[in-house]
Amino acid sequence: MQATVFILSPANANGIRAKQLISSRAQFPSAQRYRSAEGVPLSEAFAFTSALYFRGKIGYARRFAVPVPDRVPEAIFVIAPGFGLVSPDWALTPLRMKKLQRTPVDVRNRSYRVPVERDARSIAGQLREGDRVVLLGSIATGKYVDLLRPIFEDRLLFPISFVGLGDMSRGAIMLRAAVSGEELAYSTLDVERHRKREP
């Protein structure tokens, strides 16, 4: 059985909706869970702070991820700046949020780069020929690709329909695909990063 692993880029931990989530006055369920001793699942927090784009990514990944229990038991990972690649159920607490907020997503920053590379190598060690790793995030800069591609090499793919589209359009595409059950076509990272989508 071939595995399909998804790696999701993070939501903005410093944006307006993130500030709403962490507000001590917020009373909606995700904010209350965030302030609880258990914390809020990272996927739930990011789906709130990046309403359409991350919601599309996590919905799509949950629909099409293919774990292989005896060697690739986890098939969805989220980039958590400062922590590496974590489960969607990883608990986000106020202490962890502070670290997310102060860790720039920049390959020159060791506190971001080293944990991601560490966890990517661990995942790569579980893979066999034919397994796929799909990046659901931007390839227009090197902030994800430059870390992941040297480790996963040609196994690292991305949805070809993402080229030239903004985050909102990508989120909508993934939500539709998750509902329809029709998986998107993927490409290797050889595609030019800044190529615009042809009409």
Image (spheres, rainbow, N blue to C red):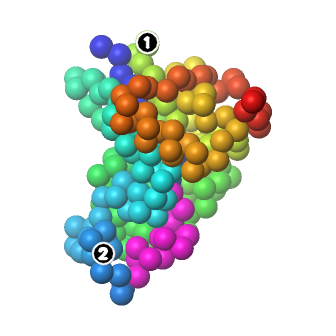
In this view, 176 is above or below 93: above
Extreme residue in the bottom direction: 25
Task: Work out whether residue 21 can be spotted.
Answer: yes
- Foreground: 27 or 76? 27
- Relative placement, left or right, of 61 versus 89 is right
Q: Amino acid at mark 2?
A: Phe
Q: Amino acid at mark 1?
A: Glu
Q: Position of residue 138 (x, y in %)?
A: 62, 43
- Quadrant that contains the N terminus: top left
Residue 15 counted in the magenta span: yes
- Foreground: 84 or 162? 162
Mark 1, residue position: 129
* Residue at x 41% of width, y 63% of height: 48
* Residue at x 53% of width, y 22% of height: 185
* Residue at x 42% of width, y 19% of height: 131
Q: Position of residue 148 (x, y in %)?
A: 56, 35
* Residue at x 40% of width, y 77% of height: 22
Q: How busy is the neighbourhood of tag 1: few (under 14 within 10 Å), some, or many (20 plus)?
A: few
Mark 2, residue position: 28
Q: Residue 59: which quarter of the image?
A: top left
- Report helix, strand or loop for mark 2: loop
Report if the CB atoms under discs 2 and 1 are less than 8 Å apart. no
- Report helix, strand or loop for mark 1: loop
* CA distance for labels 2 and 1: 45 Å
Q: Position of residue 28 (x, y in %)?
A: 30, 75
- Quadrant that contains the C terminus: top right
- Residue 155's tag is none
Q: Which residues are magenta?
A: 11-23
